[in-house]
Amino acid sequence: MCFSVASSRAQDHGVGRRSPIGTNVAGVGPFATQWDFVDLMKGANPWVYDGGPKAGQPAPVDALGNPLLQPGEKANTLLRLKLVDATQRRIPDYPAGQYTITWEGSGQFALSGDGDYQYVTAGGPGSRTFTAATGHDTLFLRIDSSPANNRLRNIRVLMPGYGPGEAGDGQPFHQVFLDRTVKPFGSLRFMDWANANGTTHNAWSQRTRDRANQYTVDAGVPIEQQLRLASRSQGDVWFCMPARASDDYVTKFAQAALYGIDAAGNPYTSAQANPAIPPVPADRKIYVEYANEVWNRDFEGFKYVTQQALAAGLNPQGLDQDFAKQWAAEMRRDFDAWKAVFNAAHQGDRIRRVAAIQAGNRFISPILLKELTAGGAPQFDVISPAFYVGVDSGAYDASTTKDKIIDDLFAGLEAAVDPRMTTFLPGTPFQVRGPAGDWLLWKQFADQYGVELIAYEGGQHVTTGSYSVPWYDDYMAAQRDPRMYDFYSAWLEAIFETVGADGVSVFSSVAPISQWGAWGYLEFQDQPDAEAPKYRAIMDYARARGDFDLNGWYNAADIDMLRAAAGTPPTGDRAMFDLNDDGMISEQDVEFLVQHRLGATIGDFNLDGRCDGGDLGDVLANYGRAGDWRRGDANGDGRTDGSDLLLWQRHASFGDFAAAGLAVPEPRTLTGSAALFVACLINGGHVRDCLRARQAP
């Protein structure tokens, strides 16, 4: 018998399972309250003429977004707009403190807002600081003059702590954004960063360049920045392909995700030792989605699919069979391009093809899934509806209270998971008996197709359409009410426990409340937890599922935290450790975490889903010493010893070692008692007998 006993600690990179709770990353813009990029220019409005007959019209810019002004012309851009809600509460949408402006070129420009004003005459590259006293006033930049032979360009407005020579110098992302919006989640969906709803670009040359000054453009945030954030996170990534993207574009995007991007902006076509822009780390899954909500007539995906269907000789009349046929064709084209690139590198299993559907449409969604099935096999890996809960706001009036709104949300959640059976799609090829609740229906479809069910978006879905509706204040109050914590807790419980879904990407990360919705689980990036019931509910639910340190992973650190709390009452902050709800914190909770969250067994110390020689190596390498889970302490007594070996052997499958063809050092390559122990096991001995041989004088 042949199996490896080498310690697996050298491979200890993110071992475990990612949290099934992901997040949508909110878009950039002057109205944004998310501190994603430390340079405020990235979210500034496109430049417009300032004054004169062209006032307010778009100003000409070069490929990187620098204004190309003629003598006598001025241009301005809005960096941040003062946000005030209906209660006159100011929303802090950027950090207060000392900012640094840097630039190249010469000319005159002015920056004003938040209690400070800077008028700068530039004769070459330079920098200047200014103070934003509050973090919630309008910030405005105006270029008054700039010579054609040395135009002002590459202007940056850097947040406090990120200027030249400061601690964060050179970092693209704000640390608070990384800590609160990125770190706790198991996946990042880049739909808004990609401007997937509205972008019309289709060629690789049309994408936003990495060095672009502003990302509030048609093609959205550069792919390079999406890759950078993927590398800074521990989560899987979810890319939305532009609806009109050419085959060449999609192939290059896939190559960029697999190999990275060079300094000229071209994807590598093979692995590089030191890529200029790193690829998505090799241990991550990549979810690939065609556009976003193609069924939505206001979005570019619907328009493009309709055009392509007509060009193909079909006759779509809204969301019908012909539309679904073309929709499926566009999806397959993108899926095939990604799979081809990754299959060639023997990494095709990393790609998860997302069939995003309209959750409430029991007609078009099943037709789409059928069109995506060839020879009985689905050409997708994930069915992805949105798990939103809405209300009948048309019935709301001046008597509507915040409690009424939240009560209606709870009623809507109950309807979404109603298990009663109903007949749907009469008169179509899909006359099927299914549950009344849409979420359960799509779980039924996912099980029938043998694929995962992961919601691309979800949360409460209440909008007013106007700031003047008489119930607007109650709408705002409901979003901040403590009962919203209860709703989001129940919403997550319904998704994972009642429906049995495989994941959800919460919509969205950080956004203020407005007439268009209250999508952010945070209203602003550094909103205190006590004021953010949605965020607290999501974090607490993640902890209660076993991600105790909120790093987007179930891993050995969570096991050790749980064991450290064993024997204490599950009260207060320790309540999260009682995973099996038996009123105690014990080894049974450890078994629940290992089996149900990590998909492993006691003795699988490297959490790779196999109890094998690599795990035995962890025990032997640390035998007789203080231990934790990764050092072979299977029973949680703080030491790695013979009792841990007994637990390892109880769960180990020696036949799997040979079947897996694992590389194995012969006993003669080991030394002393370790060699005796391994030789004994290889010859079929029991751990107790082998330990006696190891411990013999």
Image (cartoon, grey):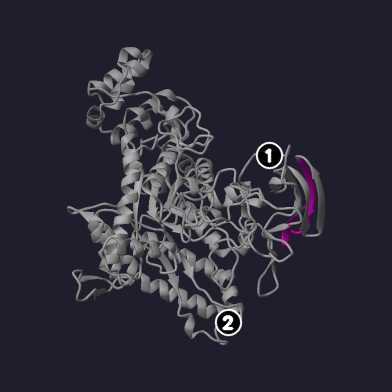
Residue projecting furthest to the front = 71
Q: Amino acid at mark 2?
A: Trp
User: For residue 630, which quarter of the picture?
Assistant: top left
- Find disc 2 in the rendering and name its residue: 471
Name the magenta segment's main secondary structure.
strand
- Find disc 1 in the rendering and name its residue: 169
- What distance separates the C-alpha of mark 2 from that of mark 1? 46 Å
Instruction: Answer whether residue 140 is magenta in the image.
Output: yes
What element does badge 2 sit on?
loop
Q: Amino acid at mark 1?
A: Asp
For the record, the magenta segment spans 126-143
Identity of the residue drawn at 35% across and 70% down: 360
Looking at the image, residue 515 sits to the left or right of residue 498; the answer is right
Percent position (x, y) of residue 135? 72, 58
Does the rendering let one see residue 19? no
Disc on res. 688: none
Percent position (x, y) of residue 535? 55, 60
Identity of the residue drawn at 54% across and 84% down: 400
Density class for disc 2 (Cα within 10 Å; few <14, some 14-19, many ≥20) is many
